[in-house]
Image (spheres, rainbow, N blue to C red):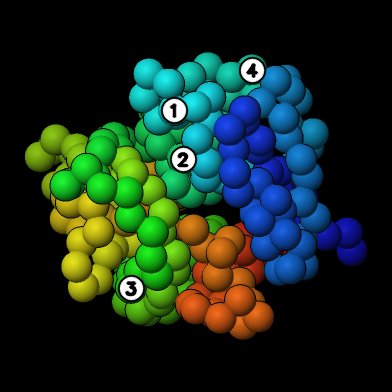
Amino acid sequence: MSAARVGVVTFPGTLDDQDAARAVRHAGGEAVPLWHADTDLKGVDAVFLPGGFSYGDYLRCGAISRFAPLMGELIPAAKAGLPVLGTCNGFQILCEAHLLPGALLRNAGLHYVCRDQRLRIESTDTPWTADYAPGQEVVIPIKHGEGRYVADAETLARLEAEGQVVVRYLGSNPNGSLNDIAGIRNEAGNVVGLMPHPEHAIEELTGGPGTDGLGFFTSILKRLVNA
């Protein structure tokens, strides 16, 4: 049986595409490079939008990336059910593309944060989090200057009521996100965005948080194999 194919998108200014591709391979999948100017998703089974500073974060984080040629293919595919995970800048792009509600603003205090962060997995009802236990606590690195999640009161209430909060900050809130939200999903559950970087926590070799992020990658590969 061939390995599941996960597309890893690179925009100008993307930093974590190689880390993301390595995480996919480490979990047993095939990482397929996707360039921002492509107009073909190359038949991938899922897509990862990694972190960085796409297009230099001009205008707003993710605002230009949302109009990249590849996004013209990805947006309808995601709406049709293609599993998509966006981390950090990828989360910002998903919000700008209206695949996820809300927005990411400058951190409270206006400081860039870079640290290992305690988190709680709130929802395992997504193809990206099924390998975790509900309420499981993990430690995954964060590194961002514009990660403060905001949404209007009605949207926040809906996210909470419908179980669309996927990951929540524990301990001190690093950026002022409303309701300590670190990650959310769309209504269908196939699109997930989060500020932490699970691709930086996939093996013991690097120390720190160890393998707490690996579950995002094993989850999607198991789902694709069993689909």
Mark 4 or 1, closer to the camera: 1
Rendering quarter of residue 114: bottom left
- Earlier along the polypeptide chain: callout 2 or callout 4? 4
Q: Amino acid at mark 4?
A: Pro
- Marking on residue 151: none
- Residue position for label 3: 118
Q: Is residue 216 visible?
A: no
With 142 as the anchor, is 19 left or right in this view? right
Residue 57: image tag: 1
Seen at 77% across and 51% down, the residue is 31
Q: Which mark is residue 89?
A: 2
Cα separation, mark 1 vs mark 2, equals 9 Å
- First of labels 3, 1 by sequence position: 1
Mark whose residue sits in front, 2 or 4: 2
Residue lying farthest to the left in this orientation: 153
Residue 165, compared with residue 78, is above or below; it is below
Between marks 3 and 4 in the image, the one whose residue lies nearer the viewer: 3
